[in-house]
Image: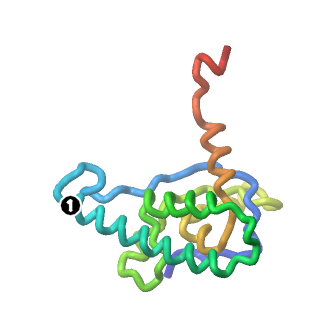
Amino acid sequence: ADGDYFDPSFTQIERILEIVEPELEQGEEEGNDDKIDGEKKADDREKTAKDKNVEEDENEDDEGKERKGSKCKLDVIVKYGIILDREDPNYEAGTGRQFLIKWGNLPHTDCSYEFERDLLLNEIDYEEHVDAFYERTNKPTKYKVL
């Protein structure tokens, strides 16, 4: 129901080749009166994400892990409208960004588009690859060239 089967054995990302941003709702995009509803939805997503992070934090054995990672993930969940709760009526729409991923040890013909929500739910580390993608695709400034 959530698209093609995602094989957990292919969780090693070599690089991200493309990022497709999610389409914003009309209220979020234009700042209409629906903005209040959009803020309420964002608050609900943030609450759900915080609940999930609290559960994950309670299950962690390593107390030395940085909390920065969970804060970044929470920001991403809220910013891109990711819905992690399968019982939510908007679950199908709350997928976040979509990435074209070149998987490690597989040829380019086996690249696939994956939703950010699926990467989060399968606990696949992808953030450094997103940063690398933006680093590769940003035009250098005149200052950087000199």
Residue placed furthest toward the bottom: 87
- Image coordinates for residue 15, horizontal then vertical, percent: 71, 52
Q: Secondary structure at mark 1?
A: loop
Image quadrant in which the C terminus is located? top right
In the image, 70 versus 103, the foreground residue is 70
Residue placed furthest toward the front: 63
Q: Is residue 94 above or below residue 136?
A: below
The amino acid on which the numbered mark 1 sits, given as a three-letter code, is Asp
- Image coordinates for residue 85, horizontal then vertical, percent: 47, 80
Quarter of image, res 89: bottom left
Q: How is the image coloured?
A: rainbow
Residue identifier under label 1: 34
Would you call the spot at circle 1 few (<14 residues within 10 Å), some (14-19), or many (20 or more)? some
Residue at 35% across, 56% down? 24
Quarter of image, res 144: top right
Residue at 55% across, 51% down? 19
- Image coordinates for residue 86, horizontal then vertical, percent: 47, 82
Q: Is 129 left or right of 85, judged from the image as shown?
A: right
Mark count: 1
